[in-house]
Image: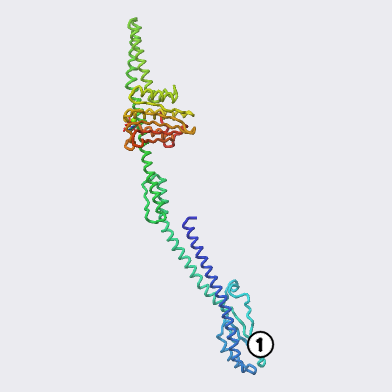
């Protein structure tokens, strides 16, 4: 059931309870009124009759009866009868039958002891006078009041319910706005901003909603930018490989082919003297080609990882930088791999160290760079590359290197953070990766 109907049902229920309580009060009042009225009329009739017949010491004549009828004819709730001879009662105040209410109503209004005692006068000649209570017309009167009032009250209940429904409809407008907002977020429309000044109770929720929409919008924009960059990087990588193949391999292959033709020609011509030189030239060409292929493979995937494993590969990398930049102290301080990470995680860690060390050499002006690698809880791989150089990561504008690294890390459901020392000196790049690579749904697993 909708919230509107629920609230309406509660209001209608309360109103109906009020209506029933009202009816109960009316009925209770009516019960008392019936008893009081009838008792009063009985007493009044008895007193009146006593006064009227006090000096009557003869048989009631027709004129007497007529006079008595005139006196009593307007008396309500009692029936006054006279009998000139035993058993022959003449009603003095005959009234037209009142409309009878339903039996249940009579049962509710007339008290259980509804049999009011008859009052009888005897002893004036043969004449007797009897006074009987007749609550029927009083009950009919109350019934008339109730049936007149009931439609009015029911109409009032319906009117109040209608007004309440309209009120609820207007009152729920901010909730409808919130609902609409969530629907738009679901449809990737993040430019939603709800007004926060309509209802104080909802203002906090609306502020949080607006904040959520803004965060989603920025994450969405960031994700789109990252995806664009990822695609661009992949394209760049392919273009570079294509260029290498074309520029480096193509001429060498062509050269090899020419030398092979020359060798064949020498062999056919019986020019054996030039054949060793030509064969050596081919050997050089092949060697060069082999180097190019190795370099390309290294770009695509560091072969040392397959040959030596991650620890030794990093060791080699650090030693390489030490050779190239002896003025800096390059250290692999820790390499504790209790559990061997997945292949993709190893490649990402290797690439991370490669990029960080290159950055140290290019931007840090550091005298020391420390690499640490260890596994945590047999579930995560932690990697820290720290230097004591320029630092100030808050001023740092990520280029392709750090952005690409972050993308690789995020793609493997990992995290990356940059921080400096307390005085803003040096830079620490921390990378956390799950040991088992499971690509995040938004990012394909990185290549090479
Ligand atoms: N260790 C470091 N110390 C000080 N500044 C650094 C360090 N590493 C990176 N930076 C700063 O961060 C910037 C971004 O680095 P990033 O590796 O993303 O790009 P890049 O090295 O400039 O270019 P490339 O795309 O070739 O890597 C650098 O230009 C440099 O200013
Ligand atoms: Mg870089």
Determine if residue 227 is in view. no
Mark 1, secondary structure of its residue: loop
Q: Quadrant of the C terminus?
A: top left
**Left or right: residue 28 compared with residue 404:** right
> Which residue corresponds to mark 1?
88
Hey, which residue is sitting farthest right in the picture?
86
Q: Observer-nearest residue: 387 or 128?
A: 387
| Residue 148 placement (x, y as % from top left) | 50, 73
Q: Which image quadrant shows ligand 2?
A: top left
**Left or right: residue 73 compared with residue 330:** right
Q: Observer-nearest residue: 270 or 399?
A: 399
Mark 1 residue CB less than 8 A from any atom of ligand 1: no
Q: Is residue 170 above or below residue 230?
A: below
| Residue 302 placement (x, y as % from top left) | 40, 24
Q: Within the image, what quadrant is residue 24 found in?
A: bottom right
Q: Observer-nearest residue: 265 or 54?
A: 54
Determine if residue 81 is in view. yes
| Residue 417 placement (x, y as % from top left) | 39, 36
Q: In this view, does 72 lie above or below 283?
A: below
Which residue is at 60% across, 89% downward? 49
Color style of the picture: rainbow
Q: Observer-nearest residue: 256 or 418?
A: 418
| Residue 356 placement (x, y as % from top left) | 36, 30
């Amino acid at each position: 059931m909708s919230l509107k109907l629920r609230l309406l049902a509660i209001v209608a229920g309360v109103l109906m309870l009020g209506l029933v309580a009202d009816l109960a009060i009316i009925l209770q009042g009516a019960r008392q009124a019936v008893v009081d009225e009838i008792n009063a009329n009985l007493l009044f009739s008895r007193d009146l009759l006593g006064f009227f017949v006090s000096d009557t010491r003869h048989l009631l004549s027709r004129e007497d009866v007529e006079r008595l009828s005139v006196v009593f004819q307007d008396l309500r709730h009692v029936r006054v009868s006279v009998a000139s001879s035993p058993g022959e009662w003449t009603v003095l105040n005959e009234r037209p039958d009142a409309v009878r209410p339903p039996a249940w109503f009579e049962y509710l209004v007339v008290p259980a002891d509804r049999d009011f005692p008859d009052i009888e006068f005897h002893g004036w000649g043969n004449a007797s006078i009897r006074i009987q209570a007749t609550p029927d017309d009083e009950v009919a009167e109350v019934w008339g009041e109730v049936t007149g009032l009931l439609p009015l009250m029911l109409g009032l209940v319906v009117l109040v319910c209608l007004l309440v429904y309209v009120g609820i409809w207007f009152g729920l407008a901010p909730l409808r706005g919130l609902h609409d907002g969530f629907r738009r977020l679901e449809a990737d429309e993040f430019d939603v901003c709800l007004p926060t000044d309509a209802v104080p109770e909802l203002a906090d929720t609306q502020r949080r909603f607006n904040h959520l929409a803004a965060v989603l919008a920025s994450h969405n924009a960031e994700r789109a930018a990252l995806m664009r960059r990822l695609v661009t990087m992949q394209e760049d990588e392919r273009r570079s490989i294509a260029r290498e193949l074309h520029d480096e391999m193509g001429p060498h292959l062509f050269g090899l082919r020419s030398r092979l033709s020359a060798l064949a020609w020498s062999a056919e011509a019986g020019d054996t003297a030039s054949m060793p030189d030509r064969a050596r030239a081919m050997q050089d060409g092949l060697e060069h080609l082999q180097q190019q292929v190795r370099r390309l493979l290294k770009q695509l995937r560091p072969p040392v990882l397959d040959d030596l494993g991650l620890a030794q590969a990093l060791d080699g990398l650090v030693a390489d930088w030490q050779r190239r930049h002896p003025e800096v102290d390059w250290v692999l301080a820790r390499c504790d791999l209790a559990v061997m990470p997945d292949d993709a995680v190893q490649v990402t860690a290797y690439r991370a160290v490669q990029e960080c060390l290159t950055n140290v050499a290019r931007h840090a002006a550091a005298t020391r760079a420390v690499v640490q690698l260890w596994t945590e809880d047999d579930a995560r791989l932690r990697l820290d590359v720290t230097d004591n150089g320029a630092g100030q990561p808050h001023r740092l504008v990520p280029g392709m290197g750090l952005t690409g690294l972050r993308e690789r890390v995020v793609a493997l459901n990992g995290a990356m953070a940059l921080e400096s020392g307390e005085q803003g000196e040096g830079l620490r790049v921390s990378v956390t990766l799950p040991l088992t690579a499971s690509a995040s749904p938004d990012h394909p697993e990185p290549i090479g």
